[in-house]
Image (cartoon, rainbow, N blue to C red):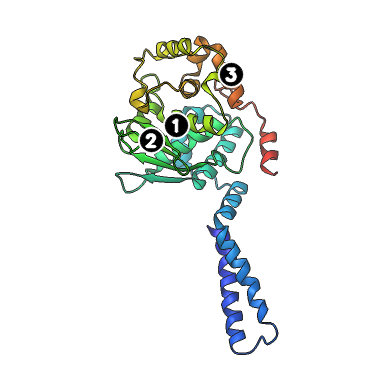
Amino acid sequence: MLIPALIIIPCAILTALFGVLSLYGYLIGFQWIILIPFVIGTGTFIIRKAIHEWWIAKHPVGLSAKEIHILSSHFTYYKNLGNEHKLSFEQRLSVFRDQKKFQMRGMEKVPGDIHLLVSATAIQMTFGLAYKKEFFPRLGAVILFPKTFITPELSYQLHAVEVNTDQYDCLLLALNMLVKGLKSPKQYYNATLYGMAKLFKKENGIQDEDLPLEKEFVLETLFRIRNFNPGYIFQYTALQDYEIFEMCTEHFFSLPQSLQDELPEIYEFLVQTFNQDPLQFNNPPLISLGEAISSSDE
């Protein structure tokens, strides 16, 4: 956290200097001056995280050439963006990645490419929305497992995606299924998209009942699009019931043409919800870049 450090360190030095001067009698009548750097430094330390997040939101660092190559090679949504929107996507991604905690279970550290691709999925889902200082503000951490996992909350079955909301929102993902979903969207669900949809749904107060078509019809159609067994999704979620909005959102970004062909009403509902159309490959966001940039200055 460079910016807070640039404030805290000089304040600590001044506090120590004024303390020494006061001790040796050089500040008689002005001993109170020691409080100025002490209060500023202490206050900065207390809110250092907020200062850091404000700074990186205002001054995104962007991505390296290697990271841009990874996105261009493995993230279709980014690859299909126009150059102007690619730059905006890269900036948003770098801010999101720096704001969120990523943890790895069963390995020493989070692989850099996975770190990048999970963050890219969060930006993909919110790219049609006006720029914010923080997307998914309640998301405290992304926890990655090498393979499907169990947790105390869902201990009876291995699964690939979970949102834990005990103290703050944690997104839990299995790397093996995450990678399969990215590489072969017709054969596997994208667990990261599904998890981000759960967060988006909660954050925006969306209910499955808000979708414009009857639940059973939507489910039958989604299963037919991929020729999936109706129970296959439970291998990802370990839940007892279907989450319709999450399933539709996963299809919306993974197989947009199929969803539009089979469920046009659902597709249009999601276009309005996310303020973007994934089939408009050169310009998915409906929001203009000018509006997004002006929103970031508020």
Q: Which mark is residue 195?
A: 1
Sequence order check, earlier mark of 3 and 1: 1
| Residue assigned mark 2 | 173
Q: Amino acid at mark 1?
A: Gly
Q: Position of residue 5 (x, y in %)?
A: 55, 63
Whether tag 2 and tag 1 are in contact, CB under 8 A, the answer is yes
- The vertical placement of 154 against 12, above or below, is above
Residue at left 67%, top 77%? 33
- Distance Cα–Cα, label 3 vs label 2: 27 Å
Residue at left 63%, top 77%? 34
Residue 284 visible somewhere in the drawing: no
Q: Residues within 10 Å of mark 3 (few under 14, many from 20)?
A: some
Image position of 21 (left or right of 261): right
Q: Residues within 10 Å of mark 2 (few under 14, many from 20)?
A: many
- The vertical placement of 276 against 265, above or below, is below
Residue at left 61%, top 26%? 275
Sequence order check, earlier mark of 3 and 2: 2
Q: Residues within 10 Å of mark 1 (few under 14, many from 20)?
A: many
| Residue assigned mark 3 | 269
- Distance Cα–Cα, label 2 vs label 1: 8 Å
Q: Position of residue 101 (x, y in %)?
A: 45, 46
Q: Nearer the viewer, residue 2 or 165?
A: 165
Q: Amino acid at mark 3?
A: Phe
Image position of 108 (left or right of 225): left
Image position of 211 (left or right of 174): right
- Distance Cα–Cα, label 3 vs label 1: 19 Å
